[in-house]
Amino acid sequence: MCVDYRDLNRVSPKDNFPLPHIDTLVDNTAKHSLFSFMDGFSGYNQIKMAPEDMEKTTFITMWGTFCYKVMPFGLKNARATYQRAMVTLFHDMMHKEIEVYVDDMIAKSRGEEEHVVHLKKLFERLRKFQLKLNPAKCTFGATSGKLLGFIVSERGIEVDPDKIKSHPRITTSAHAKGS
């Protein structure tokens, strides 16, 4: 089902809540030795609508008139609203134990014991606010991984080779030298 929110989006003021700077997030994540990459399940649909805003999402079907109780896909300010929720819920953990970019969460640690502590704290918070992860898109206890177009590891930051291969005009230094 698809609901057309163009009229609602047109009259909604822009929410300028900032998304994290990708370079800062990647810099904060690199140089750690263990990572867990997690993805929020059905992202925006986990954010409950304010009761006074539910009627703005009303739609009609042949079975009746309905409205959303959770934030539907397609709203102008969905990304900003989701990021604000994540900052509100994880403000004390961000830039220390975890990084959050909309519905992507990264737990980072220097060792195994510390990683378990960080994940326990993160899971307790997720459970407290009834947020779910998509297990098919989660990786736990990795020594490196893809993050927003980069590979992060204890060595630092590298460009994701898949990003280079996918663009025909960009070559790696080995290809440029004729190797």
Image: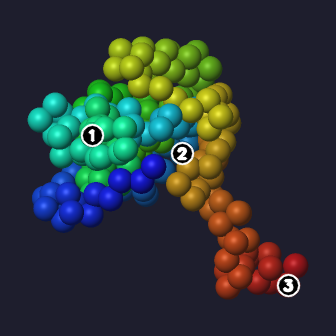
Q: Is residue 6 visible?
A: yes
In the image, which is nearer the foreground, mark 2 or mark 1?
1
- Secondary structure at badge 3 equals loop
The numbered dot on residue 178 is 3
- Secondary structure at badge 2 equals loop
Depth order, front residue of 148/172: 148
Q: Which residue is mark 1?
A: 65
Q: How is the image coloured?
A: rainbow
What type is the residue that disc 2 sits on? Answer: Ala
Q: How far, Cα to Cα, is label 2 from label 1?
A: 49 Å
Residue occupying image coordinates x 43% and y 39%: 43
Q: First in sequence: mark 2 or mark 1?
A: 2
Which residue, as the protein is rendered here, is positioned at the far front? 62
Q: Is residue 97 above or below residue 7?
A: above
Residue occupying image coordinates x 65% and y 28%: 141
Q: How far, Cα to Cα, is label 2 from label 3?
A: 31 Å
Tell me: 179 left or right of 114. Answer: right
Quadrant holding the C terminus: bottom right
Tell me: 165 left or right of 34. Answer: right
Residue occupying image coordinates x 38% and y 49%: 73
In the image, which is nearer the foreground, mark 3 or mark 1?
1
Which residue, as the protein is rendered here, is positioned at the far right? 179
Residue 146 image point, x, y percent: 62, 49
Q: How far, Cα to Cα, is label 3 from label 1?
A: 65 Å
Q: For residue 171, what is the image quadrant?
A: bottom right
Q: Residues within 10 Å of mark 2 (few under 14, many from 20)?
A: many
Q: For residue 97, what is the image quadrant?
A: top left
Residue 129 image point, x, y percent: 34, 20
- Secondary structure at badge 1 equals strand
Depth order, front residue of 12/161: 12
